[in-house]
Each structure stands twice: as structure tokens, then as C-alpha cells.
Image (tube, helix red, strand yellow):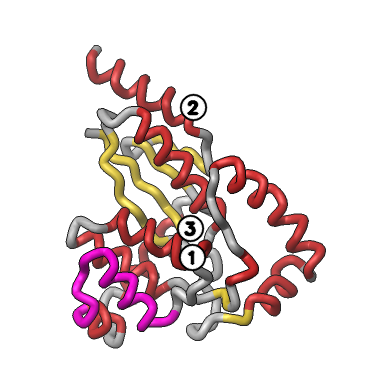
């Protein structure tokens, strides 16, 4: 097996697109060598704990509606090409994602990490749910066969908060400035959402090297 480390944030649309593209390549080659682990990276590490009304966030980040429309145009084009339903009009708040990253971490302990990432992407981009809300996160946990009551108790504690923040900071110190970032075999960094054919080539090369 070859380790594929993925740095991602569940409110990052390019991370959602990047995962969909990788998923296509993995479905086309079920015997791929990847062992996947997801790692925390917050797009907005200074976001207030309660999040921010989305319109105010867009005003602040893109200078208004026109700037946001221009920034999101390629995202919408790419998502339509992939058949992803990104419903920005349903998203009322931009959340702080620290607790969502904690959920991904705990899901990993139970072998449900990728399921958690998928569920968070769907909840945010398709359903417009506030994934900074702890009851929402507990409900998402229940949907991927984790114990929602345990997750709620963990969320109400300080459990693993500092670890997630430390891992986020370590990624930035390594030079990661945006996500998604894929790290193949602990050596080769592949930044950005990559098309399925690139992943197909990477998988073919890895298999050829293993056979050699």
C-alpha cells in the first residue's frame, strides 16, 4: 500500500471537487494502492467559533457579490462537469470548521474517516447545513454509524482541540498554503484538485514501480 495524505477543509469547494475527481480514478481502478488519511487545514483559522453570516463573509473575502460570482464561476463549471450538486444558495453561514475536523479525527479512529469527510461535504455543499453546529455534527456522526451521544460529549469537551490546531499549524509551517493538497508516499506533494486521468497515471506508475 502507498500512503496518500490529504489536507482538506470540509467547507473548501475545491476540496470537494478534488475528492470527487480522485474518487472517479479510484472507482476506475479498484486495485489502486492508496491508503488514504485526511488531515486538518482550516481555510479560515481566525473564523469566530459561531461562524459568520455567509453574505458578510463573501463581502469580506471577495469585496462583494460580483467578486464572489467571479471567484465561484470556475467552481460551478467544474462541479457541473462532475455532476456535483453544489447549492451555494442554501448555505446561510460560513462556519468555523475546528469541530468538523475533530469529528473527522474521531471517525478515523473508528475507520470511518472518509465516510465522515463525504458526509460533511454533502451536508455543507448539498444540504446547506451548518457544520459548525455541534448538534448537526452529532447527527452527521450518527449517519455514518458513530455513536452520536459520545460524539456530542467529546464536542462539548476540549478533547483534541489543541491537537487539531497544532496539526493545522504544522501543515502551514511545512509550506502548505492552500487545499486540497495531496501527499503521495510521504514525499510528493500534489497541490490542487487534479483530474482523474492524472491520478490514473500516478496509480499506474506506482504499480509499475512496485512490480519492478
Kindly report the secondary structure that dominates the magenta region of the rendered protein.
helix
Picture quadrant where residue 208 is located:
top left
Q: Are marks 3 and 1 in contact (CB under 8 Å)?
A: no
| Pointer 2 residue | 197
| Pointer 1 residue | 42
x and y percent of residue 211 in the render?
23, 15
Q: Mark 3 or mark 1: which comes first in sequence?
A: 1
How many discs mark residues in the rendered view?
3
Q: Within 10 Å of the Cα at label 1, are there few (<14), some (14-19), or many (20+) other Cα atoms?
A: many
Q: 59 or 27, which is in the foreground?
A: 27
Q: 129 or 13, which is in the foreground?
A: 129
State which quarter of the image contains the N terminus: top left
x and y percent of residue 13 in the render?
56, 56
Residue depth check, mark 1 versus mark 2: number of the one nearer the observer: 2
Q: Mark 2 or mark 3: which comes first in sequence?
A: 3
Q: Mark 1 or mark 2: which comes first in sequence?
A: 1
Q: 33 or 166, which is in the foreground?
A: 33
Q: Within 10 Å of the Cα at label 2, are there few (<14), some (14-19), or many (20+) other Cα atoms?
A: few
x and y percent of residue 173 in the render?
46, 57
**Element assignment for label 3:** helix
Q: Which residues are magenta?
A: 133-150
Residue sitting at x 42%, y 36%: 24
Q: Which mark is residue 172?
A: 3
Amino acid at each position: 500500500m502507498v500512503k496518500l495524505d490529504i489536507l482538506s477543509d470540509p467547507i473548501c469547494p475545491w476540496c470537494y471537487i478534488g475528492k470527487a475527481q480522485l474518487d472517479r480514478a479510484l472507482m476506475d481502478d479498484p486495485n489502486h494502492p492508496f491508503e488514504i488519511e485526511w488531515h486538518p487545514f482550516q481555510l479560515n483559522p481566525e473564523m469566530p467559533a459561531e461562524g459568520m453570516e455567509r453574505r458578510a463573509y463573501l463581502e469580506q473575502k471577495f469585496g462583494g457579490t460580483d467578486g464572489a460570482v467571479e471567484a465561484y464561476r470556475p467552481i460551478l463549471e467544474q462541479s457541473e462537469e462532475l455532476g456535483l450538486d453544489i447549492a451555494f444558495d442554501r448555505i446561510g453561514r460560513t462556519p468555523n470548521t475546528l469541530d468538523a475536523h475533530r469529528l473527522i479525527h474521531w471517525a478515523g479512529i473508528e475507520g470511518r474517516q472518509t465516510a465522515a469527510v463525504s458526509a460533511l461535504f454533502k451536508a455543507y455543499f448539498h444540504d446547506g447545513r451548518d457544520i459548525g453546529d455541534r448538534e448537526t455534527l452529532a447527527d452527521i456522526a450518527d449517519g455514518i454509524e458513530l455513536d452520536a451521544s459520545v460524539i456530542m460529549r467529546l464536542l462539548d469537551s476540549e478533547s483534541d482541540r489543541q491537537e487539531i490546531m497544532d496539526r493545522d499549524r504544522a501543515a502551514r509551517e511545512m509550506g502548505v498554503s492552500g487545499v486540497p493538497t495531496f501527499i503521495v508516499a510521504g514525499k510528493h506533494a500534489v497541490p490542487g484538485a487534479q483530474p482523474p486521468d492524472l491520478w490514473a497515471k500516478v496509480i499506474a506508475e506506482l504499480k509499475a514501480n512496485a512490480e519492478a
